[in-house]
Image (spheres, helix red, strand yellow):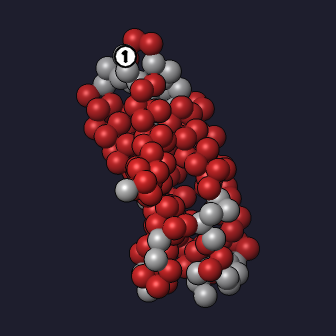
Amino acid sequence: MKRLMIVVALIAVPVVVPAAAVWPPSVSLSNGFVYVAPLLAWNAIFWRAIRIDRFFEGEAPKALLAAEFVARAFVFTMPVFLVTEPESRWFTAGLGTYLAGTALYCGSWLVLAYGDEIRISGSPLLQLAPAYTPFLSFAGLALMARSPEFAIGAGLFTVLHVAEYLMKRS
């Protein structure tokens, strides 16, 4: 039971903080980076626990790595220039998508870090989950800011990120 409570808390923190930032809307921070910061913080705190090299030991082509780096730079810097619009009809749908995506992303890290090694090693979808689940968070941010350009960039980053891991698959 204690372990379950820890897992729920670890998932809840990056999901609840941005949700609290938008309530009430009149005092919220409308900068898109507010929504990317929890994902970056999660990566910084837990990147060692995931031990991704267990499944991905190969090398990806340098051109793919360069393209993925450019797309990553776009996805993590563009939100600084995005302004969310709480009054927009798209905001609620975007926030729901963002929160669901963030919960799935954080959960996928926890599964890889603390899950059953045998089940994980037999499931490419679980192994790749931290590469494709952020798209939901980014899509939610794109909806909240009404930015199709960000959605396209996030989609490109996700495709390149997954391709990188597929090329490194051991």
* Residue placed under numbered mark 1 in the picture: 24
Q: Quadrant of residue 56?
A: bottom right
Q: Residues within 10 Å of mark 1 (few under 14, many from 20)?
A: few
Q: Residue at x 45, y 45 (%)?
A: 9
Instruction: State the image coordinates of residue 47 (x, y, percent, origin top left).
Output: 65, 59
Q: Looking at the image, which residue sits at the far right?
A: 62
Q: Residue at x 51, y 61 (%)?
A: 109
Check the picture and name the quadrant holding the C terminus: bottom right
Q: Quadrant of residue 58?
A: bottom right
Q: Relative to the observer, which residue lies in front, 103 or 71?
A: 103
Amino acid at the residue labelled 1 = Pro
Q: Is residue 52 above or below residue 70?
A: below
Instruction: State the image coordinates of residue 6 (x, y, percent, origin top left).
Output: 46, 51
Q: Is residue 63 above or below residue 117?
A: above
Q: Residue at x 63, y 40 (%)?
A: 77
Q: Quadrant of residue 81?
A: top right
Q: Is residue 152 visible?
A: no
Instruction: State the image coordinates of residue 95 (x, y, percent, origin top left).
Output: 35, 36
Q: Residue at x 59, y 66 (%)?
A: 50
Q: Is residue 103 above or below residue 168?
A: above
Q: What is the tally of numbered marks visible in this picture?
A: 1
Q: Is residue 50 visible?
A: yes
Q: Is residue 167 above or below residue 85?
A: below
Q: Relative to the observer, which residue lies in front, 44 or 157?
A: 44
Instruction: State the image coordinates of residue 159 (x, y, percent, origin top left).
Output: 50, 66
Check the picture and name the quadrant holding the N terminus: bottom left
